[in-house]
Image (cartoon, rainbow, N blue to C red):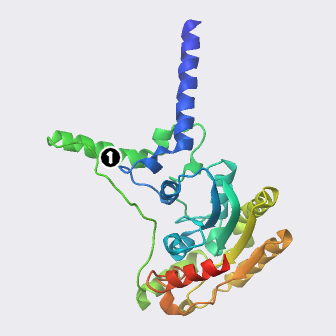
């Protein structure tokens, strides 16, 4: 009986520690490990409540530069961010929004099978140990340490301070941009409505959550490079977004055609020289 009680106590202790590691996500505070976009955001904003949040994918991440902004919004842009990511962050209590939420949308923010970053903490299954879930982060540091020991060196990992999220500079050349556009044409521009079902349900969840919690929510359809033309699927997806926004009384602003091509790095990412400063200034005025 004592053995059984001891085993149960060990199991309970393991899950308690693992739960604490999961929700504290200590990687965000460790400069010796490589952080993903969400962990960088957490590191930059350790406060328990993020009063104003600007969510979206890498287009938001590179376009809205909070370090240049006076609006006080947390840039919650994620490299492969979709509405289901935001839904999971809210449902699993990884974020708490205070008073305002702005959602930057484009087709890929709403595509159910869009590539994701598997290291985002909300993808962790409840039965999966934290150390195993984060193995791709821990393993290189451990193996590098052992290798240093074998060569008589200090095994301590190097610090990786001031880790930054993705931003873009300059403009892609014609051939590179055409290759990117062709890839998108083949993979993303001929999808049926069913390919967006989960993310539109997540969009509705977020709207309802904001309504219940007195959070002001607004939506943007993000800028697109005029050099690329407007894909036929965009007006259709935008009309679907408009219907959902209208159903909840959410303000939606269409910014698709506001910038010239020299503001863009590629199809939709604004560059740091002209695009991001202009967009951040516009957001400061609008927000």
Q: Which residue is mark 1?
A: 141
Residue at (44% x, 55% y) in the render? 35
| Residue 135 picture location, percent across and down | 43, 44
Q: Would residue 45 appear left or right of 215 to someone viewing this image?
A: left
Farthest left residue in view: 152
Residue in front for this viewpoint, 94 or 199:
94
Q: Would residue 17 appear left or right of 199 to someone viewing this image?
A: left
Farthest front residue in view: 70
Residue at (58% x, 18% y) in the render? 8
Mark 1 crowdedness (10 Å alpha carbons): few <14, some 14-19, many ≥20:
some
| Residue 2 picture location, percent across and down | 56, 7
| Residue 272 picture location, percent across and down | 45, 80
| Residue 239 picture location, percent across and down | 77, 80
Residue in front for this viewpoint, 235 or 12:
12
Does 46 sit above or below residue 191? Answer: above
Does 254 sit above or below residue 93? Answer: below
Residue in front for this viewpoint, 101 or 71:
71
């Amino acid at each position: 009986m004592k053995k059984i009680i001891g085993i149960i106590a060990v199991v309970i202790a393991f899950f308690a520690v693992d739960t604490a590691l999961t929700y504290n996500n200590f990687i965000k505070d460790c400069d010796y490990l490589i952080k993903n976009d969400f962990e960088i955001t957490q590191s930059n904003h350790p406060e328990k409540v993020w009063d104003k949040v600007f969510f979206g994918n890498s287009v938001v991440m590179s376009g809205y530069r909070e370090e240049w902004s006076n609006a006080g919004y947390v840039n919650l842009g994620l490299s492969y961010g979709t509405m289901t990511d935001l839904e999971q962050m809210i449902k699993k209590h990884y974020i708490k929004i205070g008073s305002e939420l702005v959602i930057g949308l484009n087709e890929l923010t709403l595509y159910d099978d869009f590539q994701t970053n598997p290291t985002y903490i909300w993808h962790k299954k409840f039965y999966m140990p934290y150390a195993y879930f984060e193995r791709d982060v821990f393993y290189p540091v451990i193996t590098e340490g052992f290798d240093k020991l074998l060569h008589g060196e200090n095994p301590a990992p190097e610090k990786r301070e001031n880790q930054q999220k993705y931003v873009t500079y300059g403009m892609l050349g014609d051939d590179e941009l055409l290759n990117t556009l062709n890839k998108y044409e083949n993979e993303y521009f001929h999808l049926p409505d069913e390919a967006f079902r989960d993310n539109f349900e997540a969009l509705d969840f977020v709207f309802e959550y904001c309504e219940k919690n007195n959070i002001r929510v607004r939506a943007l359809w993000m800028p697109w490079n005029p050099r690329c033309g407007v894909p036929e699927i965009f007006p259709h997806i935008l009309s679907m977004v408009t219907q959902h926004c209208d159903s909840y009384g959410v303000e939606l602003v269409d910014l698709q055609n506001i910038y010239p091509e020299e503001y863009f790095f590629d199809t939709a990412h604004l560059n740091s020289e002209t695009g991001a400063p202009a967009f951040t200034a516009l957001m400061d005025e609008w927000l």
